[in-house]
Amino acid sequence: MAEYARKKAALKIQPRPLGGQLRLAKSTVSNLFRYQSRDAPERPLSLGHFNEVIALDRAARTLDVEGLATFESIVGHCLPQGFLPPVTPELKHITIGGATVGIGIESTGFRHGFVHDALREAEVLLPDGDIVTCNARNEHADLFRGLPNSYGTLGYILRARLALIPARPFVHLRIEPFDSPPAFLDAMQQATARDEIDFVEGLFFEDRRFYLMTGCFTDEVPQVDDILREHIFYRLVQTRKDVYLATADYIFRYDPEWFWNLPDAPFYSLFRRYAPRRFRNSGFYTRYAAWKNRLRDWIPALAPTATEPLIQDWEVPWDKADELVEFCLQEVKLDGRPWAVVPIRTPGQPTLYPVAANQLYFNLGCYCQVRKAEGREPYYHSNIMDRKCFELGGIKMLYSSTFLGPAEFDARFNGEAYRALKAKYDPRGKAPDLYEKVVLKAG
Ligand SMILES: Cc1cc2nc3c(=O)[nH]c(=O)nc-3n(C[C@H](O)[C@H](O)[C@H](O)COP(=O)(O)OP(=O)(O)OC[C@H]3O[C@@H](n4cnc5c(N)ncnc54)[C@H](O)[C@@H]3O)c2cc1C
């Protein structure tokens, strides 16, 4: 705490230059994925040094952590002591602050909700430089409930206090294949009601293969599968009934391949097997992808013309899951890559992400390039999936590109409540507005 207090005292916000907007500068990669490049004048605020774990309280089962600490460092601190955050994102370099204001999901979501549901208290640097502590009961409870889905537009989290859950060293994953959405979805829903199960998720493919994966913490396993060098996680689970992983490997199972985006070509097989560990993670992959994109900006001939990214998450009420699955199977071709699914039930109701409390939702994610739809506008697939999700009473996450007009955005993400929060916590508009930030401009 002393070190954190010292950093906090040293924090000074510079006066806002004309036309500049507050932007978070940090040393780890961003896990935003916005397709269109948006140049906005900005005023970078460097908070990258707020990246450490402060203290774990075993008796209270809570963790105090700085806002820009990555989940890799949080898991590295908590797991050896037998604890984990209830919902830990799958990419190592996602930070606690980013996942709280950006909506974080995982295979524990059927029991523990979203990442932000574990938040007990936050210290927030408001856009004008004041620092406030908010929790569910104090005078800043409105800010506390408004942080999820605010994307830094109400201020930056400098310190978070999180509830923790007990964890064990290994995860035993059982995989069950299905060939129809109703059977797959029924089995998944039933799994969410079983007390002994700690993790529930699924993958499915356009040839109508569906894999339900249920996992349990355990102290002992007959073997430990290696998904860094030997196996590729999403391929392994298509060939096995049981997979045994060290808990940290399970938590970050999609990190080494950035889901399924390392190609299967011979060069990448060698890379997979022999590259130093520091290159076998999503942070390295993200930097590599950014470098490739810059190269394509300079040499347009290198830019892929046949594909575009479809990196999005959508949530619909559980009784609409079947319809969403049939829709995506018919309308979008992933060329052998999977769709990813987790069931989510949130105990709370965040102001800016209006999902119903205590209701099971179906979260569908797509994390790869897709073939462009011939004769259609760019990002056709993102748009039709968004429309279908909304038609089914669902909601989409905003870490990726969003193409809504301001009125619809307002209606879907509680614009009225947002404006009240903005007027109270950023009255002089020093940070960008949410619509401006997630639809129109950068970061
Ligand atoms: C390919 C891909 C895969 C993903 N997979 C998962 C997943 O498995 N599980 C999951 O839960 N989520 C996932 N996400 C979503 C991810 O959690 C969000 O994009 C999250 O906002 C990223 O946080 P970050 O720490 O990387 O922060 P950044 O990407 O750097 O920032 C995200 C936003 O949060 C703001 N922000 C960052 N730090 C703070 C802070 N301390 N206080 C306030 N605002 C802050 C930034 O200004 C920015 O607007 C994925 C996203 C992508 C693109």
Image (cartoon, rainbow, N blue to C red):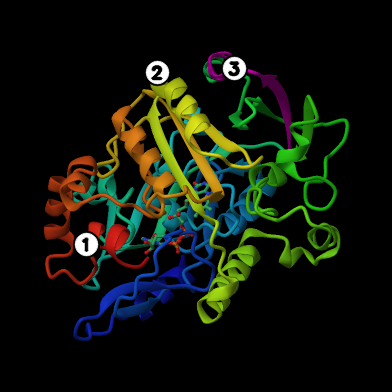
Around disc 2, counting alpha carbons within 10 Å, would you say few (fewer than 14), some (14 to 19), or many (20 or more)? few
The residue wearing badge 2 is 319
Q: Position of residue 277 (x, y in %)?
A: 77, 63
| The C terminus: image quadrant | bottom left
Looking at the rendered structure, the number of numbered marks drawn on it comes to: 3
Q: Residue furthest front?
A: 375
The residue wearing badge 1 is 433
Looking at the rendering, the stretch of residues picked out in magenta corresponds to: 169-188
Q: Which amino acid does label 1 sit on?
A: Asp
Magenta highlight on residue 179: yes
Q: Quadrant of residue 422?
A: bottom left
Q: In which quarter of the image is residue 45?
A: bottom left
Q: Is residue 215 above or below residue 379?
A: above
For residue 180, which numbered disc appears in the image? 3
Q: Which residue corresponds to the image point at 33% horizontal and 32% vertical from the top-left?
A: 394
Alpha carbon distance from label 3 to label 1: 43 Å
